Amino acid sequence: MKLISSTEISKTPIFRVTLDRAVDPDGFEIKRAIVQHGGSAVMMPVDERGRILLVRQFRLPARQYLWELPAGRVDEGESLLKAAKRELAEETGYRAKTWKKIAEFFPSPGFLAEKMTIFLATGLTAGESKPMEDERIEARWFSPREVSTMIKAGKVRDAKTMIGFCRYRGK
């Protein structure tokens, strides 16, 4: 496929929306409105006891509170790892000594140009969280068995958390 046009139709501080057209060598054309996003870093904090730190916050698009792995947008010019370290500290107060990339995926590639990268964060030390002014975050430790039960029971409905947990368990 060859991109033949991309026109910005909307812009917010977090993402842009473009109307894109692409064509393949046979002349088959695709037109889509695409949400352009700079990517997200996702952190899977695991302590020395093997517990997983999840955060709970109200997600307006989902219209509900969700338990999920901490995550945040990669700022322009920022590396994925730097974003992961910043977001973990902001949302939970924790800092990690060891970081390992465990997954990369596109959460909704039909209309969203966002890539999420999940990092396993270990060797944790506690600190003070500093969430953004529009975030109210509760952080809590769960055993792997509890996370598995929550996923099976539909109490964890967030894709990045399910993917991160599966990749972590399959390490």
Image: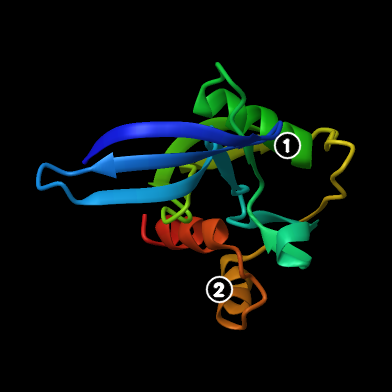
**Residue occupying the point 58% across, 56% down:** 50
Q: How is the image coloured?
A: rainbow
**Residue occupying the point 85% across, 33% down:** 130
Quadrant where the C terminus is found in the figure? bottom left
- Which residue is nearer to you in this view: 53 or 66? 66
**157 sits left or right of 13 in the view:** left
Residue at the farthest bottom position: 153
Kindly identify which residue carries mark 2. 148
Local secondary structure at mark 1:
loop
- Whole-percent x and y of residue 29? 25, 49
User: How many marks on residues?
Assistant: 2
Say few, some or many: other residues with alpha carbon within 10 Å of mark 2 (under 14 / 14 to 19 / 20 or more). some
- Which residue is nearer to you in this view: 133 or 127? 133
**Residue occupying the point 47% across, 56% down:** 108
Residue at the farthest top position: 77
Kindly identify which residue carries mark 1. 94
Q: Quadrant of residue 125?
A: top right
**Amino acid carrying mark 1 in the image:** Tyr
Local secondary structure at mark 2:
helix
Q: Quadrant of residue 49?
A: bottom right
**Amino acid carrying mark 2 in the image:** Ser
The tag earlier along the polypeptide, 1 or 2, is 1
Say few, some or many: other residues with alpha carbon within 10 Å of mark 1 (under 14 / 14 to 19 / 20 or more). many
Asked if marks 1 and 2 touch (Cβ < 8 Å), the reply is: no
**39 sits left or right of 128 in the view:** left
**136 sits left or right of 44 in the view:** right
